[in-house]
Image (cartoon, helix red, strand yellow):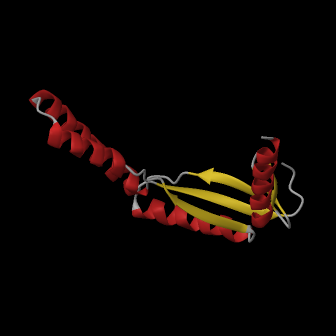
Amino acid sequence: MIKDIRKISKRKKATQDLMGIEGFGKYGLKANKYDLAFFAVQPTNISVLSAENIDIRIHHLMILLSLVPELEIICLDSCECFDGNKRNIQNRLETEGNPKVRQLLKSDLEFLDNIQAELSTARQFMFCIRSKGLRF
């Protein structure tokens, strides 16, 4: 039992070593050469802004990004995968005999489709600053 725990500990440590991670902090992680701080940013819904306001925001962001050359940007798609749930509901629809339950299953399927469409357009951004000697 203790031997297995040691193997697992060594394996986890080896993965961190392979990735160059020495430890985790409140805002990021400490790597071999650098400390990485991460900041989550959610964009404004620009579809409701005027073209002039969008241009101003883009210009301000360009100025901000040019001031911090170490800054890296990571874009994430917040879309969830509903395929397994949708397949399960479709299988239930094929076997369900009760019309009221079938109607509820169809409503659930439509709901999942709507949520998936909404989330597929949502984006999240992470700003990452790579620096030496950050204090976490």
Q: Is residue 103 left or right of residue 54?
A: left
Residue at horizontal 90 percent and vertical 59 percent from the top = 133
Residue 47 pos. (x, y %): 38, 56
Residue at horizontal 62 percent and vertical 57 percent from the top = 126
Q: Is residue 60 visible?
A: no
Residue at horizontal 15 percent and vertical 43 percent from the top = 94
Q: Residue furthest right?
A: 133
71 or 7, which lies in front?
7
Residue 116 pos. (x, y %): 34, 50
Q: Is residue 73 above or below residue 25?
A: below
Q: Is residue 107 above or below residue 132?
A: above
Residue 75 pos. (x, y %): 55, 62
Residue 25 pos. (x, y %): 79, 47
Q: Is residue 82 left or right of residue 101?
A: right
Q: In which quadrant is the N terminus drawn?
A: top right
Q: Is residue 132 left or right of residue 29?
A: right
Q: Quadrant of residue 97?
A: top left
How many marks are shown on the rendered structure?
Answer: 0
Q: Is residue 58 visible?
A: yes
Q: Quadrant of residue 10?
A: bottom right
Residue at horizontal 40 percent and vertical 52 percent from the top = 81
33 or 70, which lies in front?
33
55 or 132, which lies in front?
132
